[in-house]
Structure formats: structure tokens, C-alpha cells
Amino acid sequence: MSVGFKDVNIGVGTVELITQADGSQILRNKEALGDYPDAIMSCLDRWAEQAPDRVLVARRNDAGEWIEVTYAQALGQVRSLAQALLDRGLSAEQPLVILSGNSIEHLLLAFAAMYVGIPYAPISPAYCLVSKDYGKARYICELLTPGLYMVDNASEFAPALNNFAEGNEVIAVDPKGYDGKVTAFTELLQTPVTETVDQAHAAVMGDTIAKFLFTSGSTGMPKGVINTNRMLCSNQEMLASNMCFMRKEPPVLVDWLPWNHTFGGNHNVGIVLYNGGSLYIDDGKPVPALFEKTLQNLRDVSPTIYFNVPKGFEILADQLEQDDALREKFFRDLNLMFFAGASLAQHVWDKLDAMAIKTIGARVGMLTGLGATETAPSAMFASLEESQSGVIGTPAIGVEIKLVENGGKLEVRVKGPNVTPGYWRQPDVTAKSFDEDGYYKLGDAAKFLDPDNPQRGMRFDGRISEDFKLDTGTWVSVGPLRAKVIEAGAPLVKDAVIAGLDKPFVAMMVFTDEEQCRKLSGLGAEASLAEVLDSTAVRDRFKAVLKHLAETSTGSSNRVRRAVLLDEPPRLDAHEITDKGSINQRSVLENRADIVADLFRKTPSDRVISNEQ
């Protein structure tokens, strides 16, 4: 007998599907979106008054102790910081740019900017610390013309700052090691507050720009997505209408997801602020070397909602199976889980369900959905009953989804108060991104789980721009095929790049999980990744994957005949990977054209793994 979900209050809307004269369809909820504030920082005022001593944000210091900041403390510090920003004449034309990762200081300064209507832009630290040419960071800053920069450690960012920020003032938590104009963060906290802060705060309205978030760019430079206060507030009301339990139980998050990305910075930080919750910053990451930090934090704090990427859930599930105390702590207060970024393998999902049932006697729901930086981010949610990898559900309350026939698929377009007005200083790109009725063109495709029952929702059907035709004219739907490859190759496959444009068959390049492949190979730590991937055990496993894909295929469009295991990871400077870890298919195909050519040679090299007889 199937075990049910933990009893939590999840909102369920009633959808209607309307077919228009031009053949397009409109999918929306009959329910109206509830009221929401004009300015996101009014939530800080509210909770500082109603729950002044509640923890807003906490982070471990170098000694491992939690440093906590309450709502009342945060409001006082935010107002002083806001005055310092106003004194420096910042504006949309000269915004604040934050280069560092998640920290208490980052959060407070970002809140300070938004409190008085100054836009800020959190930039991926990888653009300064991983990139070798600083090309993306320099491009972004030339587009924004910042009036002020903020970093945690000045010496760490000094090479990048010297490359593109010469002459600008830099605010640093640790100002040592940078020869430019630098001011200590603590100095800003001492700024006396004047009435100009209250005047600027009162002037913030729905159309006021809160932040610029930069998309990673499919092949070129990132685009600056304008995020208004209306976008942020309306989307949080949509989330609260879906996860209704947050209205009565302030959420507690243990979270590492980066704030330069909409999932971490809008979705998760917003959930905390909008609902008076507490955010425990997790300095861990879903990689073996750093995940122990995450486990240590989860041993201290029981989250009420838990967000992660599939790899994080995979590692966590293994640890929960081995550590009863951790399992008890993790599931004790947990109401819901949510993943984004890629598909969650079914064996991981099953293991999490089993651990929850063992601990609390019920499954904890794992929600799925669809969103984008341009939608702040949530646009669609699946119900708990339908939620599974690939299912994106129905529109959030207040959102209209327009479905348009495109290449045999239904292209998804979005309209709602959570949708961006466009891209900063790029009117041509903005114009191309919206249709004649004002719907934002996501570039995603979807299909109904049951065409006769739209209430069940929709399934993701790939990116329109990634799909291609074989030389036979057969369309290859890349998104669903990638998900199938990742599932078939779990846990050895991180991601796959699908090739075959104008070719007679489909092939793939595979980014592998080095740890899992090394374990399977039986080779020692001294062996190179190339040697690991060339081992008999690993190659045989991938031959079996190709055989499975062939046996379960329905035709040439989803039968993968050849594969190459890549021993060079995706490159940030070459636009092959985003800071959140997703792969740019087109960039990999272009940058590794020699490998693609090898895949389709009549007699390929020995590195090509084949399912052909």
C-alpha cells in the first residue's frame, strides 16, 4: 500500500484552458492572486515590528559558531547602510555591484540598497575567481556602469578589481590586500541615519527596480534581467498561495544556493523575508569536499523547507541512510522539499521517500515546477500527487500561460505581475523576447499529462532552441532525451550533450561524475580521469547504457548510437557552463567540434563508445 504525504497545507488552484481564434491556448487559474505589498523591503519593516527578536539570518564564523542577526538588528543596520549608499549618490544609472558569494554582509547591503530604491546586481564570484580573463565580469560592469562595488575579501578579488573596477570605491568586509579605493564594511555601519532614508524608502513602488540578475547567456555574454519590486512581491504571494503552511509557520531554511541566481536570491531569500522566516547560510556545496559543512549545519538546524539541486539530494540521501541522528533531525520539522537545475534520478527520490517514511511515517512532498530569471522565478507548480522529474504542473495563481504551436511542440509563454519588463540597456533583445500580446517567450516547450484533463498539469518537453533535425527530417527533442540519458547512466552521468544536427543518427558527449567513475574503474587516486574513463569497467557500463537506450527507444529521434566520455570539464570562459552548473549545449558542440566530427566518422577513433554491431 502506498504511504501518503505528511499533512501540510498546499494550495490547489482550479485551472481553465481557453482556445483562442489563432489556435493558441491560454492556461490560467480561476482564482485571483491575493494582495501583496508594493515594496519587498516593507516586509523587513513588518517583521522587525512583529517579531523583532526572531533570527533573520545566521552564518557560522571561522570558529564554527553561529553568528545570528535578528529582524530588529537587521533593520537598524540596513538603515545605516542605506544612508551610506544614498550619500554616495547611487542610482539605477550607477548601481551597487556585489561580487562576493552569500554572506550576512552581502544580504544586509543588498537589503539596504533595495530599502531606498537603489538597484543592485549580485554577480557570480566565478566570473572573478574562476575565469582567467574576467571577460563576463568586465562586460557586465561596462553595461551597468556601477557606482560602488562590494566584496568580502579584498585581496581575493584584487586581480579582478584591478582589471575592470579601477577608480571605483570598493566596500570590503576584509579590506586588506587591495591598493585601490577601499572602505571597510564596518565603517558604513556607523553612518548616522537622516530623514533622507525614510523619504527614499517611502518612494519605492512596484515599478522601482530592485535588482539586476544576469542570465548566463547561451553562447554569448550574460543579459541583465530587470527585477522590479512588483515582480518580487507578486511572486512571493504566488509562492505563499501554493505553500500555504508558510503563512502560519515561519519557514526555516538551511541553504547554500547562490544569490546571484534567481532560485537562491529571489525564491529562497524571498521566502524567508516575505514570511518572517530564518535563513541559515550554508557554506557547504554538493561536492564531496564541501558537503560535510552542509551535514554539520543540518545536524544543528532542522529546516521546514529544503531546497537543493539533484546532486545535493543524491549525496544527502546516502548520508541520511547511514546516520540515524541526522535523519531524525532533518525530517523532524520538514514540510516540503524542492529541487531545480536538472532532473532528480528516481532512485534518489525513492530513497528520500523511504527515509522519510522510516522517520515520520509519511513521505515529505518534493515539489517541481517551471520558472526563469525573467519570472522572478516561479511560473508553474506541480501538485504533490503529480510531482515527479520533468513535471512542471499548472500556472501559479496570477500567471497566464500561453501555449503556441512551434515545430510540432507547444511553446510556453508567460504573462503576469512577476514577469520582467525586459533587459537592462538592451531594448532590441527585450523586443525579441515578448510576443505581440506581451507574453514573455520562455523558449521552453511543454505537453499535457492528460490532454483531456488540463488540471493534472504539464510536463517539460525541452528547449525549443536546443532541438534539431536529423538528415532524415526527424526532430530530436533534446531535453527529454538528456533526462533519459542521465537517468539511464545514474550515478555516473552528470550531464549529456546531444549531437546529430543534419546527421543520420543521434550521438552524445557525456560529462561524468568523476568520483563514481573512479570507484567503478577500480583505479587508484594516481590515475588520471582519462585513464579512469578508458578503463574496461567504465566503458562496459556505458556500452550497457547505450544498449538500454536502444532497447527503450521508440525510433531514431531517441536512439543514441555513439558516445564520448569527456575528460575535460565544461569551461566557464568558453560559455560551456553557467555558474549554477547547467550546461550550454550549443557552446559545447561548437567548442568541441573535433569530438563531434569523430562521433560521426565512418570509422571513429577508439575513444568513441558504440552500440553498433
Image: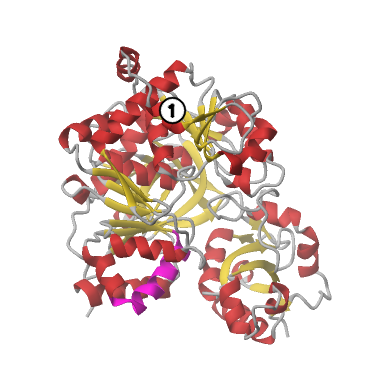
**Residue 375 versus residue 202 in the image, above or below:** below
The residue labelled by disc 1 is: 187
Q: Where is residue 44 in the image (x, y as percent from the top left)?
A: 27, 33
Mark yes or no: residue 20 visible. no
Toward the viewer: 590 or 122?
Answer: 122
Q: Position of residue 555 (x, y in %)?
A: 60, 72
Question: Dividing the image into 4 quarters, which one contains the N terminus?
Answer: bottom left
Mark yes or no: residue 507 visible. yes
Question: Which residue does the image show at 83% across and 73% down from the upper left?
Answer: 602
Q: Quadrant of residue 74?
A: top left
Within 10 Å of disc 1 (Cα), the crowding (few <14, some 14-19, many 20+) is few
Question: Dividing the image into 4 quarters, which one contains the C terminus?
Answer: bottom right
Query: As shown in the figure, which amino acid type bears the numbered disc 1?
Result: Glu
From the viewer's perspective, tell me whether residue 133 is left or right of residue 46.
right
**Residue 10 versus residue 357 in the image, above or below:** above
Q: Quadrant of residue 504?
A: bottom right
**Residue 535 versus residue 389 in the image, above or below:** below
Toward the viewer: 572 or 14?
Answer: 572
- Span highlighted in magenta in the image: 309-324
Circle 1 — which element? Answer: helix
